[in-house]
Every structure is written in C-alpha cells, then in structure tokens.
C-alpha cells in the first residue's frame, strides 16, 4: 500500500471511529435527563459529574479523532474510557435470553472499537491530519534522512 493509500485509510478510519463518539456525546447532552436517569438506574454515584465528564470525553475525543489532532492521546483516552463503560453498561452476564444477546453484542462492539482505538493510538493519525500539519517543518524530512543515513 502506498503512503497516500495508507494516509487515506487512516483518515477514513478516524472519521468512522469519531462519529460514534461525537453522536453519543451530543445525544447525551441533548437528552441530559434521560441519560442521567439511565445512569442512576445502573447505580452510578455523582451522576451529574460523571455525565458531564462523559460528554467531554466523547465529544473531545471524537473531535480529536475527526480532526487528527493529538490523535494518539485522544484514541488512548477513548479506549480507557470504554473499559468501565463497557463493564458497567453492557454487563451481559447479568441478563438472560434476548437481553443477554443484545448486551453481549454491545460488549463485543465496544471491545472491537477499543481495538481500533489502540491501533490508532499506536500508529498515529496519518498524513491527512492536524497532527501531521503541526509537525511539519521545513527540512524535517531531510534531517530525518540524514540521521538515518549517519546511523548506518
């Protein structure tokens, strides 16, 4: 795969991953009371604080992925965020029948998203990102090539 294809795939992957967090965070903000009620039903303490933090993480992390800005940190934060969310809100082992199946699917979906986020955290945003734009400087590539050449 050529660099342009890799960068295009990274951009598409970031866009696809970002949308679930952006939509979830915005929906939670627009439906604050309903979301707070669901969190209370799960036995969560300090619901207003956790709900506000959830919205900040989802929207902030989603924007980080979308724009490719501080992508490694945004992806890592979202992956860590999904651990307690998945364990608390998709605890399929507490259900039976169709509810168990649905919660297990959501659990597995979140685990798969965590995998994608960890790959993104390791690989970075790619060339089509604010991270790449911010890190570009005149002669940067030349300096890297010279360092690599002198190491041999």
Image (tube, rainbow, N blue to C red):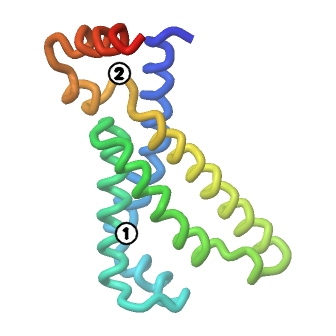
Between 81 and 33, the one lying in front of the other is: 81
Instruction: Please tell me how crowded label 2 is: few (under 14), some (14-19), or many (20+) other residues with Cα within 10 Å.
Output: some
Q: Position of residue 39 (x, y in %)?
A: 47, 83
Q: Position of residue 105 (x, y in %)?
A: 72, 60
What residue occupies the far left of the structure in this picture?
A: 138
* Alpha-carbon span between mark 1 and mark 2: 29 Å
Q: Residue at x 32, y 45 (%)?
A: 64
Q: Is residue 149 above or below residue 129?
A: above
Label disc, if present, on residue 54 of the rendered structure = 1
Q: Residue at x 45, y 43 (%)?
A: 121
Q: Position of residue 43 (x, y in %)?
A: 52, 91
Residue 6 appears left or right of 103: left
Q: Is residue 18 above or below residue 87?
A: above
Q: Quadrant of the C terminus?
A: top left
Residue 60 appears left or right of 105: left
Q: Position of residue 117 (x, y in %)?
A: 50, 46
Q: Quadrant of the N terminus?
A: top right
**Which picture quadrant has residue 51?**
bottom left
Q: Is residue 32 above or below residue 27?
A: below
Question: Which residue position is annotated with label 2?
Answer: 127
Under circle 2, the secondary element is: loop
Between 110 and 133, the one lying in front of the other is: 133
- Marks 1 and 2: which is nearer the front? 2
Under circle 1, the secondary element is: helix
Between 89 and 81, the one lying in front of the other is: 81
**Which picture quadrant has residue 53?**
bottom left
Between 78 and 144, the one lying in front of the other is: 144
Q: Residue at x 56, y 53 (%)?
A: 114
Asked whether disc 1 touches disc 2, contact meaning CB atoms under 8 Å apart, the reply is no
Q: Residue at x 41, y 34 (%)?
A: 124
């Amino acid at each position: 795969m050529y660099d342009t294809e890799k960068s295009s795939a990274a951009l598409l992957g970031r866009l696809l991953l970002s949308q679930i967090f952006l939509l979830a965070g915005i929906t939670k903000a627009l439906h604050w009371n309903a979301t707070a009620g669901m969190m209370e039903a799960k036995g969560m303490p300090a619901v207003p604080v956790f709900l506000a933090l959830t919205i900040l993480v989802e929207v902030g992390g989603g924007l980080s992925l979308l724009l490719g800005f501080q992508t490694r940190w945004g992806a890592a934060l979202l992956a860590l965020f999904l651990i307690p969310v998945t364990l608390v809100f998709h605890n399929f082992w507490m259900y039976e029948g169709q509810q168990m199946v649905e919660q297990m699917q959501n659990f597995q979906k979140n685990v798969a998203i965590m995998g994608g986020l960890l790959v993104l955290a390791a690989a970075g945003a790619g060339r089509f990102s604010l991270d790449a734009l911010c890190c570009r400087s005149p002669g940067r590539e030349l300096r890297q090539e010279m360092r690599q050449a002198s190491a041999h």
